[in-house]
Amino acid sequence: MALPTSLAYGVPSVVLLLLIRHIWHRRHHYPPGPPQDPLIGNLRNVPKDKPCLTWEEWGKTYGPLVYMNIVGKPYIIINSYEVARELLEKRGGKYSDRPRFVMAGELVGLGIQTALAPFGPLWRRHRKFFASALAPHVIVKNYSSIHERKAYQFIQYCLDRPEEYRQNIKRMSGEAVNEITYGASRNEEYDFVDLNEELSSVTGRVMQGYLVDFLPWLKYVPEWMPGAQFKRDARKWKGQYSWTRNYLLGTVQKAVASGHPFRTSYVSSLLQAVAKSDTRQEDEGMIGSSGLTFYRAANDTVSHFVTVEAGMSNKVLKDIDPSYFQTVSALNTFLVAMSLYPEVQVKARAELDRVLGDRLPSLSDRNELPYIFAIVQEVLRWVPPFPNGLPHRLMEEDTYEGYYIPAGATVFANLWAMSRDPNIFENPDKFDPDRYYNGTAKLDSRDFVFGFGRRVCPGNHLAIQGIFMTVATILWSFEIKDKSPINKRDMDSRQIFNLNFTAHPEPFDISLEPRLPNLHEYITRGISEREALE
């Protein structure tokens, strides 16, 4: 049977284009990388599990800057903090774009969310929103009582259901982010955490990978054509995202306009700030998008990108849990670390008992609890929440130490490799808060785990505040023990953790044992006191 005309001409054209790219590639001095196959490049080298570990090994072989070509698309992996700082920060004007996401960004409409937005006016406007509403002094003033109350409620959840500590972390973190973003975690109609979980299921389908991401012209195919189910799905999912964004924004708009007292939130603060603006209607639409971004976009970005662009396997897709984000990842890592290193708990509790006695921790105690804060810093270093980093896109060609980096290249900063650099961290595989407590660490984990340059996570100060408060409260409340019959302390953390999109431990059996017989009374009183302040 004869090939359709479009296919008969299209296939040779694609092959010719790849051949031209292959010849062009040989004319430039690219960074070193794994050997390439003709036409498909490094397609067969794409890691099928835990990409950061493969990239780390490549770094040992090829150096801090590794080049890949996947079916004509250039990729750069940065395995060194110094190189990442030079390229992504000092030359940040060139590296601040995001790769193109046709299905998710253009057809489903997620390109209006901050993390997926291309570098330009929309992205700059969103960043201004974040800069004003998430400045450190604003976070302390507006959100401290929420973080304290949610930390206490997490203890309450664990007293009621201690075996469900991972679900309790997700529940507490989801409620906290919703209250900070929208002023509430539920209303008479909906549980806002459930709404976001529903979007997570949509995201799981969006990020499975579509042909249109490799052949962008397919976006113009009419919906009614055979094989265009992706267009019909995109329209449905776009409607679901739009409805959720507008509904959550509308709840805050009604509260602000009611004239009655309302809880200060990220969205309410911005709505009040633009109330008298000549571009209020446009600004409010952007506020709605940035609000939804605040809860979800970072996870959707990395999982969608690595899956679609780098061709990850179905095995990796099964490991994705889009509801994991920085705080959830860090708190799970913290509990594992404490169960493996009980001597750290002993030292931490000694500091807590000396400073607090029988009083619950609060954020005002932070400066008096340097060892607790060192634990937070070490948790972030030991297992970075996003070990593979988030992708940047180079907007114009660049060179580094004689190597050519082509415009349009997608650039990953391998945060895992940076966390394991023996030139920066002595005995990097060991969980050791003393490296920060004693000031011997050459690099603060906060300087790399939240990203680089203009694309650094805008909620980093908020995340640190929430993690610190929860860590202090857990250590004050519980003794954390490893219940596994196998001694996992000597195991490599590469085996203990899933290091695909967001880092989280493989199933881990721990127990949380109350340190006080009347712990429930302390927690109930603490929650009531914080609710009165709000």
Image (cartoon, rainbow, N blue to C red):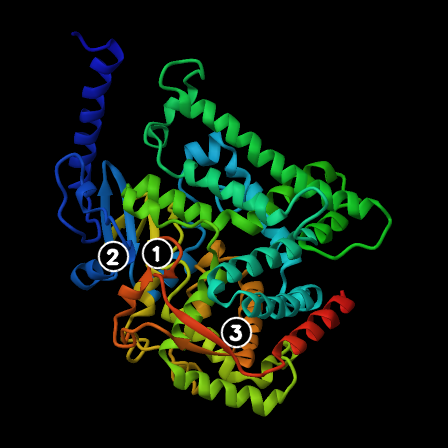
Name the residue at 59% across, 47% down: 126
Q: Nearer the viewer, mark 3 or mark 1?
A: 3
Q: Nearer the viewer, residue 515 or 372?
A: 515
Q: Quadrant of the N terminus?
A: top left
Outermost residue toward the right? 259
Dot placed on the residue nearer the N-terminal end, 3 or 1 = 1
Name the residue at 71% across, 75% down: 525
Query: Eyeballing the image, is 525 above or below 210?
Result: below
- The CA distance from mark 3 to mark 1 is 24 Å
Residue 68 at x, y percent in the picture: 23, 47
Q: Quadrant of the C terminus?
A: bottom right
- The CA distance from mark 2 to mark 1 is 9 Å
Q: Label 1: which residue?
A: 388
What amino acid is at disc 2? Answer: Trp
Name the residue at 78% across, 47% down: 255
Q: Nearer the viewer, residue 325 or 120?
A: 325
User: What secondary structure is found at the residue carrying circle 3?
Assistant: helix
- The CA distance from mark 2 to mark 3 is 31 Å
Q: Label 3: which residue?
A: 471
Dot placed on the residue nearer the N-terminal end, 2 or 3 = 2
Q: Nearer the viewer, mark 2 or mark 3?
A: 3
Locate residue 463 relative to residue 137 in the image: left or right: left
User: What secondary structure is found at the residue carrying circle 2?
Assistant: helix
Q: Label 2: which residue?
A: 55
Dot placed on the residue nearer the N-terminal end, 2 or 1 = 2
Name the residue at 56% across, 51% down: 295
Q: Nearer the viewer, residue 93 or 201?
A: 201
